[in-house]
Image (tube, rainbow, N blue to C red):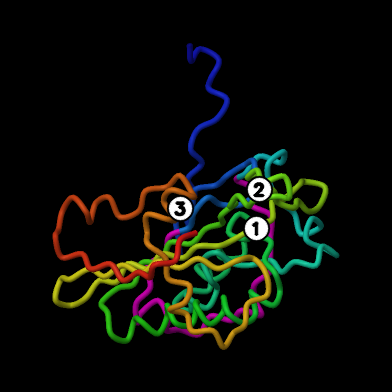
Amino acid sequence: LTKYGLPGLSQLRSRESYVLCYDPRSRSALWVIEQLNRETLSGTSDRAACDFQEDDSVHEYHRATNADYRGSGFDRGHLAAAANHKWSQKAMRDTFYLSNIAPQNPHLNQNAWNNLEKYSRGLTKSNKNVYVCTGPLYLPRMEADGKMYVKYQVIGKNNVAVPTHFFKVLILEKESGEIELRSYVMPNSPVDENIPLERFLVPIESIERASGLLFVPNILKRTSNLKAITAGTKC
């Protein structure tokens, strides 16, 4: 059956600053995971020396280009944030591959989502490590006919998918060995930056059901020291 090869396999990319699983259909990542601590946030890396670039490890049929974003009205939103990786110029530069980017509402990107990224970095002051897993969601909504549909915009010649929402899962490693889990979902639309981030907390199960992903399976198997901080809101 595999004589001529298989039409597709899981597309993992391991960079200096993160690991991602690429989704060739959406032209973005399914998820990106990175490790933050005091060391990764320290350094002299310069964002001005970084440029958004195509990921030539992705087949040309399935990759986004800068031209796709031009004039679209969307920001090139980082999944693994550039500011998380000041420890190495290459690590920061790797965050500018378009495989680590998704179309993001400018108001969200520059305000509420940016606040969530800053909050994630701030957690390194009181935790040994902060693992951050970020990705897009394409959530259904009810239309006028009373039926549920998954609808999303695409941009550019390469039909880059515009997520309806974004998720961010934070895994906090404490010096005591305790593991704390926080999971957030924000809509890909303008969000009042004055709304407390706690309002966007959701049960991790909501993201797992919506994304088809399963988070922290190793933690759940290896330790009972898992504390999940969630709110009652569902995706």
* Mark 2 lies on residue: 27
- For label 3, the SS is strand
Say whether disc 2 or disc 1 marks the residue closer to the N-terminus.
2
Which secondary structure, mark 1? helix
Label 1 Cα crowd, 10 Å radius (few <14 / some 14-19 / many 20+)? many
Please tell me whether residue 196 belongs to the stretch shown in magenta: no
Q: Earlier in the sequence, mark 2 or mark 3?
A: 3
User: Which of the labelled discs sits on residue 98, or is there none?
Assistant: 1
Q: Amino acid at mark 2?
A: Arg
Nearer mark to the viewer, of 2 and 1: 2
Viewer-side residue, 84 vs 201: 201
Badge number at residue 233:
none
Dot 1 and dot 3 residues touching (CB under 8 Å): no
Name the secondary structure under disc 2. Answer: loop
Instruction: Say whether residue 51 is left or right of residue 117.
Output: right
Give, as a three-letter code, the residue at label 1.
Answer: Leu
Q: Quarter of the image holding residue 66? A: bottom right
Magenta stretch: includes residue 41: yes
Lower sequence index among marks 1 and 3:
3
Prevailing secondary structure of the magenta residues: loop
For the residues labelled 2 and 1, say whether their Cβ atoms are less than 8 Å apart.
Answer: yes
Q: Is residue 116 left or right of residue 155?
A: left
For the record, the magenta segment spans 33-57
Residue drawn at (55%, 47%) of the image: 22
Residue 151 in the image: above or below residue 184: above
Picture coordinates of residue 55, whole percent (x, y): 64, 52
Which residue bears the numbered disc 3? 14
Identify residue type, mark 3: Ser
Q: Quadrant of residue 50?
A: bottom right
**Residue 116's spot in the image, x, y percent?**
50, 78
